Amino acid sequence: MSPLTLTRRRGLAAAGWLGPAARRLGAGVAVLWAAATAAYLALMLAPGDTIDVLIGDGLDTPERRAQIIAEWGLDRSPLQQYGDYLLRLLQGDLGHSYVLQRGVGEILASQIWPTVQLALTAATFGVLLALVLALATAGRRSWLGGLVGLSELAVVSVPPFLVGILLLAVFSFTLGWFPVSGDRGFVSLVLPGLALGLQIAGVLGQVLREGLERALEEPFAVTARSRGITEWRLVAGHALRHALLPAVTLTGWFTGALLGGAIIVEAVFGRPGLGQVTVGAVNSKDLPLVMAIVLISALAYVTASTIVDLAYLAIDPRLRRSR
C-alpha cells in the first residue's frame, strides 16, 4: 500500500469520527442551553414576587433583598437579566443559596462525590452481573436460563428502595455483614450499590441475552461454526459485539435510573450525597439549589448520550463508513 493511499484512508477514518462527534457535541450544547433556559423561565414565571421565590424559607431582610437584586440584576431589563444569567453559568457560577447561606457550587461540590461513588458502584454491579448472566445463558434452553429470566423480571418489578430495605434486613440487621447507614468506605457502598444495580442488571441482562440469541442465528455464526470455532468463543468473541448496540441504547435510561434512584436509596441508607441535598432543597423551597441540580442532571444526560453515540461508532465501523 502506498503512503498516499494510507494517508487518505487515515483521513477518511478521522473524518468518520470527527463529523458525528462534532454534531453530537453541538446537540449537547443545545440541550444544556434549553435546560438552563427552562430553569430560568420557571423562576421568572413562578407565582409571586421573584425575590420571595429566591429567598424561599431563608431569612428575609432588606439587606438580603438588596443582595438578590444585585446578584440577579432584577433592576435591569429582562433580556439583560437572562444574558447575565447565561454568562454566570458559562463562568461556572451556579448562584447562591439564600436558605443555607452558601454558594450553590460549594454545596454541590461537597456532596457530589458520594453520589458519584454510589452511581459508579451500582453501574459496575449492574453491568458485570448482566454480562455474566447473559453470556452464561444465551442460546441455552435449560432450567438455569428460565430461573435467570424469572429473577431478572422480579428485580425489574421491585423498586430500588424496597430492594434496599430487604438487603438491610438480611445483611445488616440479621447477619451484620455491612453497616446500616453512613459513608464508611467501600463496605458501606455494597448494599446501596446492589439496590440500584440489580434493576439495571435485570433490564440490561434481558436485552443482552436477546441480542446474543439473535446474533447466534445470523449467517456469520453459521459460518464460524462450520470452521470449528467453539461456542464460547463464538458468543464472547463475535456475537457479543453485535448484541452491544441495543444494550448501549439503554444508557439514557441507565443514567436516569441512577440519578432518580440515588435520591431515594441515599435516604434509605442514610448516605450523604445529592439525594439528601435535593430533598432538603425541595422541602425548604431553595430554588437556586434546585435549578442547579436540574442543570447537573441535564449535563449528566448529555454526557451519557454523547458517549453512547461515540460508542456506536467504535462498536460498529459500518456506521462510520455510512456517515
Image (cartoon, rainbow, N blue to C red):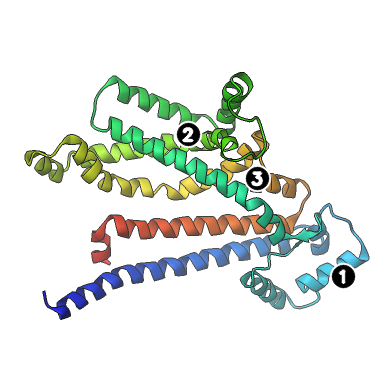
Amino acid at dot 1: Ala
Q: Earlier in the sequence, mark 1 or mark 3?
A: 1
The residue where tag 1 is placed is 66
Say which element carries label 1. helix
Ranked by sequence position, the earlier of labels 3 and 2 is: 2
Element at label 2: helix
Callouts 1 and 3 close, C-beta under 8 Å: no
**Sequence-earlier tag: 2 or 1:** 1
Task: For marks 2 and 1, give the CA distance.
Answer: 50 Å
Q: Is residue 11 left or right of residue 192?
A: left
* 20 over 212 or under it: above or below: below
Q: Amino acid at mark 3?
A: Gly
Q: Which mark is residue 198?
A: 2
As helix, strand or loop, the secondary structure at mark 3 comes to helix
Task: Check disc 3: other Cα within 10 Å, few if <14, some if 14-19, many if 20+.
Answer: many
Amino acid residing under circle 2: Leu
The local crowd at label 1, few if under 14, some if 14 to 19, many if 20 or more residues have their Cα within 10 Å, is: few
Foreground: disc 1 or disc 3:
3
